[in-house]
Image (spheres, rainbow, N blue to C red):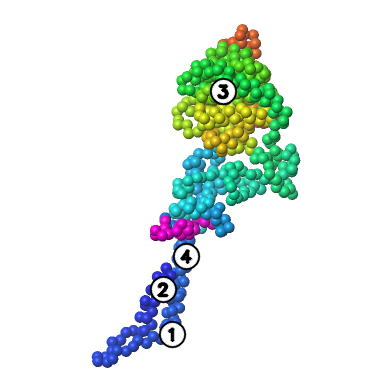
């Protein structure tokens, strides 16, 4: 632009400064043109003014028009020339040029649809609508600039996912919760780490519950450390580890070959159809929930031929076989398991049964079966195998979303009471490692938190792929929906939602589960609380326990119910009727 105006003025300066042309008289000599000093100064000033005006217009056009050349136009261009042409996406000083060569934005929903990380996706909200992408080298910076932002004053261009990643052969994704007050993030150019290093202003005592204080210096903490509650995951005590190793783990591993030989013919009968086995584990104390699951499935005419129940006592084995299902009992590994139901989440009985949950899936993955594991507090409304059989499975493992998105379950929040495992090398090795690290379950009292910690490492280091069946979808509801999603529960009760299963998680004990199922219309076990009628039946037969219709009873006015329960007491003090 500057050169154009400059040449234009120079080419006309002589013509205009010399005044009008006059033809000389005939025969007269030709006159030399006279250019006045004043005219020269005026036109020269006009020329300079035009040049700088053109320069300004050109610069303004360059900064606001984001269309840069796609590539160097000559064969001799160096990479630095190309990088210079793409300065519109670089926003960083030279001190950071090795770490940040440029930055763009991409739409968050588009990005997470393109790259399914398997985690339960939070909803996109205002202020969390884009993903910020950095480029570490000028050679990675995309040549395609943001056409949509032409004429805008936004500093960071917005591209499609495909355009933003067109020159990337590796993409690393960091997840962090937005809007957290007091949280900062540092990206350091260094030999790379695949873990987040976390520092907090908290007391030096790991057992302190005082939370953060701005008066304290930063110190390194575990990723599960909470700003309010302090450290949430303790290290197992030495005596706990030794006791677990000698009484549980060593006997299990020493008898593993014999156990697999004993299990193999039973598994072959159950899993012969498509190499898939549906697994439950149960003791007598929880058997009323198991009977309800079986009766519920039979009432809905759902096939149970691929179900194998791991029984931790002979009483439960008799009940399962009396209802026509396959059962497996191993005295070496299950003899010391608790016979009674857990009184509450995480107590000694609960933790003991968690080990049985680890063992049964480990055994079947070692025999190379696909496994659908579920707790006994799950009921079917459609056959769950249809979900996994009627689609291409791109992930190694699928978990129901627990709904409790707390720090110790991050970033997956996998519910270990309902999950599907493909028979591949990665999953076999995962459960092999989980068995040997099960002392974490003894310490934490939670199968779920122990599995999550091992899961994170195998996803990062071994390439295990995991998909969470999101709580925001309709197919696999559980305790989260029962307690916190009233619109969903209203549609479910009205028959507008047709999930595959309903998992009565998020409960204190089996009494709560029974009562919630009864008032929801999902209870089909007529043998009474605790299967009391089974005590009088020969061989613990449960043949007479199944009701053809649901047994509906009111217990709590403040929880979802098939019929209004306004006259019942609330389970949570002073809560009004759910209806």
Give the mark toward the camera: 4 or 3: 3
Q: What is the spatial separation of the Cα atoms under label 2 and label 1, in whole angstroms?
A: 19 Å
**Would you place residue 183 above or below residue 322 in this image?**
below
Label 2 and label 4: CA atoms lie apart by 16 Å
Q: Residues within 10 Å of mark 2 (few under 14, many from 20)?
A: some
Among the 4 quarters of the image, the one containing residue 202: top right
Q: Which mark is residue 59?
A: 4
Q: Secondary structure at mark 1?
A: helix
Find the magenta span and give its range: 71-91
Apparent side of residue 216 relative to residue 429 in the rendered image (left or right):
right
Q: Going from the N terminus, do you reach mark 3 or mark 2 first? A: 2
Q: Earlier in the sequence, mark 3 or mark 1?
A: 1
Give the residue pinned by disc 1. 38
Residue 320 place in picture, x, y as percent: 57, 15
SS at circle 4: helix
Nearer the camera: disc 3 or disc 2? 3
Viewer-side residue, 64 vs 577: 64
Give left or right: position of 246 versus 2. right
Residue 543, located in which quarter of the rendered image?
top right
* Residue corresponding to mark 3: 363
Q: Residue 6, which numbered label?
A: 2
Query: Distance between the Cα atoms at labels 3 and 1?
Result: 102 Å
- Evaluate whether residue 547 shows in this view: no
* Labels 2 & 4 near each other (Cβ < 8 A): no
Outermost left residue:
26
Q: Estimate the spatial distance between the alpha carbons at disc 3 and disc 2, rounded to whole Å.
A: 84 Å
């Amino acid at each position: 632009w500057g050169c154009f105006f400059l040449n234009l003025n120079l080419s006309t300066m002589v013509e205009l400064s010399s005044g009008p042309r006059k033809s000389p008289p005939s025969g007269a000599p030709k006159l030399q043109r006279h250019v006045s000093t004043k005219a020269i100064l005026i036109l020269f000033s006009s020329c300079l003014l035009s040049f700088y005006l053109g320069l300004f217009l050109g610069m303004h056009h360059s900064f606001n028009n984001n269309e840069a050349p796609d590539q160097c136009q000559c064969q001799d261009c160096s990479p630095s020339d190309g990088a210079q042409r793409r300065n519109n996406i670089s926003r960083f000083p030279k001190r950071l040029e090795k770490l940040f060569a440029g930055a763009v934005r991409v739409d968050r929903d588009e990005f997470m649809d393109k790259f399914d990380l398997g985690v339960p996706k939070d909803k996109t909200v205002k202020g969390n609508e884009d993903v910020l992408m950095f480029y570490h080298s000028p050679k990675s910076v995309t040549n395609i600039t943001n056409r949509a932002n032409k004429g805008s004053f936004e500093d960071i261009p917005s591209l499609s996912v495909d355009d933003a990643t067109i020159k990337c052969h590796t993409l690393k994704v960091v997840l962090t919760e937005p809007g957290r007050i007091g949280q900062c993030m540092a990206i350091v150019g260094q030999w790379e780490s695949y873990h987040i290093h976390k520092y907090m202003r908290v007391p030096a005592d790991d057992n302190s519950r005082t939370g953060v204080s701005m008066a304290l210096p930063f110190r390194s903490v575990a990723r599960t450390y909470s700003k309010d509650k302090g450290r949430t995951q303790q290290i197992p005590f030495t005596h706990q580890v030794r006791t677990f190793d000698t009484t549980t783990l060593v006997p299990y591993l020493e008898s593993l070959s014999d156990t697999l030989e004993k299990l193999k013919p039973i598994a072959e009968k159950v899993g012969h159809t498509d190499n898939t086995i549906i697994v439950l584990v149960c003791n007598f104390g929880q058997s009323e929930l198991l009977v309800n699951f079986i009766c519920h499935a039979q009432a809905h005419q759902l096939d149970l031929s691929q179900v194998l129940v791991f029984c931790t006592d002979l009483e439960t084995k008799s009940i399962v076989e009396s209802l026509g299902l396959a059962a497996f009992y191993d005295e070496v590994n299950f003899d010391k398991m608790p016979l009674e139901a857990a009184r509450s989440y995480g107590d000694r009985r609960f933790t003991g049964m968690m080990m049985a949950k680890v063992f049964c899936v480990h055994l079947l993955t070692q025999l190379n079966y696909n496994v659908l594991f579920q707790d006994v507090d799950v009921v079917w409304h459609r056959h769950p195998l249809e979900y996994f059989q009627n689609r291409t499975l791109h992930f190694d493992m699928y978990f129901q979303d627990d709904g409790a998105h707390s720090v110790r379950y991050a970033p997956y929040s996998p519910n270990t009471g309902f999950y599907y495992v493909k028979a591949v090398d990665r999953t076999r090795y995962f459960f092999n490692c989980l068995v040997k690290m099960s002392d974490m379950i003894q310490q934490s009292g939670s199968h779920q938190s122990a599995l999550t910690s091992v899961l994170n490492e195998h996803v990062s280091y071994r390439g295990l792929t995991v998909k969470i069946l999101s709580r925001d979808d309709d197919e696999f509801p559980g305790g989260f929906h029962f307690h916190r999603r009233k619109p969903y529960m209203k549609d479910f009760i009205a028959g507008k939602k047709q999930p595959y299963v309903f998992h009565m998680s998020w409960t204190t004990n089996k009494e709560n589960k029974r009562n919630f199922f009864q008032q929801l219309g999902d209870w089909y076990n007529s043998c009474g609380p605790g299967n009391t009628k089974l005590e009088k039946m020969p061989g613990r037969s449960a043949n007479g326990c199944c009701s053809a219709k649901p047994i509906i009873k009111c217990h709590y006015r403040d929880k979802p119910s098939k019929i209004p329960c306004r006259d019942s007491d609330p389970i949570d003090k002073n809560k009004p009727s759910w209806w």
